[in-house]
Image (tube, rainbow, N blue to C red):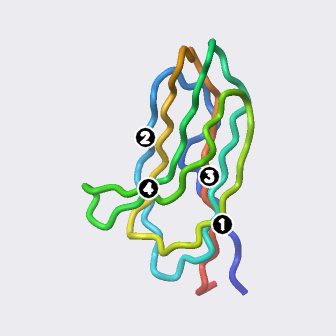
């Protein structure tokens, strides 16, 4: 039976600037992806937090895989990934509006079908 694994693409920490995670390379047996966003604190007026997962086959040209609902306050969201995932995945967090800081994390849960 395949076990569920969790990868933290963006750890829960205070951010004052935009963030792009390092790329994660799932192997061919990785299946059933779920993306998770959690934002526990937001400081500033009229804040916007845009978070997405991107994927690539070559490490240069990145394509949006998952786009979370824009946050204007604390919140969380889970998204099932139903499309094929390319060879590398990363998280991108864009802080906008007059936001001064946000505490957010992005995780990727998945199964390895060989286990």
Mark 1–mark 4 Cα distance, whole angstroms, equals 22 Å
The reply to whether the C-beta atoms of the residues labelled 3 and 4 are less than 8 Å apart is no
Q: CA distance from mark 3 to mark 4?
A: 16 Å
Q: Which residue is mark 3?
A: 107
Name the residue: 43% across, 55% down.
Answer: 64
The C terminus: image quadrant: bottom right
Q: Label 1, label 3: how many angstroms apart (C-alpha)?
A: 10 Å
Residue matched to label 1: 5
Q: Is residue 48 above or below residue 111?
A: above
Residue at 43%, 40% (x, y): give it: 20
Q: Residues within 10 Å of mark 2 (few under 14, many from 20)?
A: some
**Residue 6: where, in percent of width, then height?**
65, 60
The mark closer to the camera, 1 or 3, is 3
Instruction: Give the residue pinned by disc 2.
Output: 20
Q: Secondary structure at mark 2?
A: strand
Q: Earlier in the sequence, mark 1 or mark 4?
A: 1
Residue at image mark 4 = 64
Marks 1 and 3, the one that precedes in the sequence = 1
Q: Is residue 7 above or below residue 97?
A: below
Which residue corresponds to the image point at 47% horizontal and 43% vertical from the top-left?
Answer: 92
Q: Are marks 2 and 4 in contact (CB under 8 Å)?
A: no
Q: Are marks 1 and 3 in contact (CB under 8 Å)?
A: no
Q: Nearer the viewer, mark 3 or mark 4?
A: 4
**Of the numbered discs in the image, which one, if any, rests on residue 39?**
none
């Amino acid at each position: 039976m395949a076990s569920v694994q969790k990868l933290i693409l963006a750890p829960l920490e205070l951010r004052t600037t935009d963030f792009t995670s390092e790329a994660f390379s799932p192997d061919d047996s990785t299946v059933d992806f779920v993306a998770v966003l959690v934002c526990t604190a937001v400081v500033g007026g009229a804040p916007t937090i845009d978070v997405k997962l991107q994927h690539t086959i070559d490490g240069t040209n990145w394509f949006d895989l998952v786009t979370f609902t824009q946050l204007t306050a604390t919140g969380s969201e889970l998204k099932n990934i139903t499309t094929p995932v390319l060879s590398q995945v990363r998280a991108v967090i864009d802080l906008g509006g007059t936001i001064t800081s946000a505490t957010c994390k992005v995780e990727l849960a998945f199964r390895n079908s060989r286990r």
